[in-house]
Amino acid sequence: MKNQRRIYDQELYVHFVTFSVFRRRRMLDTDQAKRIVLGVLQAELDRRSSRCVGFVIMPDHVHALIWFPKRGELSSFMHAWKRRSSLQIRSVLKDQLSTYFSAGNGSESFWQRKYYSFEIYEEYKLEEKLTYLHLNPVRAGLVAKAVDWKWSSARWYEGGRSVGVRIEWVP
């Protein structure tokens, strides 16, 4: 019997997605770049009536927990999020990092081509992944406590503070 690959994009799971800046460059160091990633995330969530359970933006990669009300949304969502955010960030950074772009780096991709998705269908696993992504800045030595990292949903979970994206738990 041939082993068939299961396509999780056709399931109504929460998707734990990870994607990185091309060559793991620290192109998300600026607050402006991080705001763009969050703004595009919220716009894409709204377009699809989707939910973000949690996220973290690191200097060179992003983690997010996303749920879609319809099957088959993950690929188009990720394509739109990465494409729109890269175009906007490049536009902003071109002015701020003219030396970087004049060295020929501007023709390189902004994001790594692929993204990784881990499908979550149990609440304990969802909580585990949420904790993992919130502790990412602590493990990287950027902050002492997860709640101190401005660019994650940890502040929303700790005290209901605004984090730039609407955070919603999935039943």
Image (cartoon, rainbow, N blue to C red):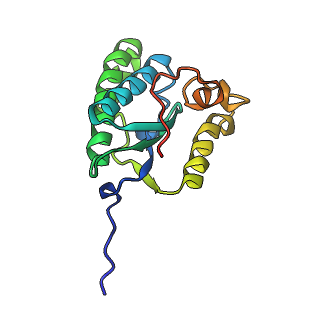
Q: Quadrant of the rendered structure where residue 5 is? A: bottom left
Which quarter of the rendering shows the N terminus? Answer: bottom left
Q: Is residue 106 left or right of residue 142?
A: left
Against 4, is 64 above or below? above
Across and down, in percent, residue 30 comes to 49, 19
Q: Is residue 4 left or right of residue 24?
A: left
Residue shown at the point (41%, 17%) measured from the top left: 97
Q: Quadrant of the rendered structure where residue 20 is? A: top left
Across and down, in percent, residue 122 comes to 52, 57
Against 80, is 8 above or below? below
**Depth check, front residue: 67 or 114:** 67
**Depth check, front residue: 76 or 94:** 76
Q: Which residue is at the far top? A: 95
Q: Is residue 133 visible?
A: yes
Across and down, in percent, residue 63 comes to 49, 40
Across and down, in percent, residue 139 comes to 68, 39
Q: Is residue 40 left or right of residue 157?
A: left
| Total marks in image | 0
Q: Which residue is at the far bottom? A: 1
Q: Is residue 104 visible?
A: no
**Depth check, front residue: 80 or 12:** 12
Residue shown at the point (51%, 37%) measured from the top left: 54
Residue shown at the point (54%, 49%) measured from the top left: 126
Q: Which residue is at the far right? A: 144
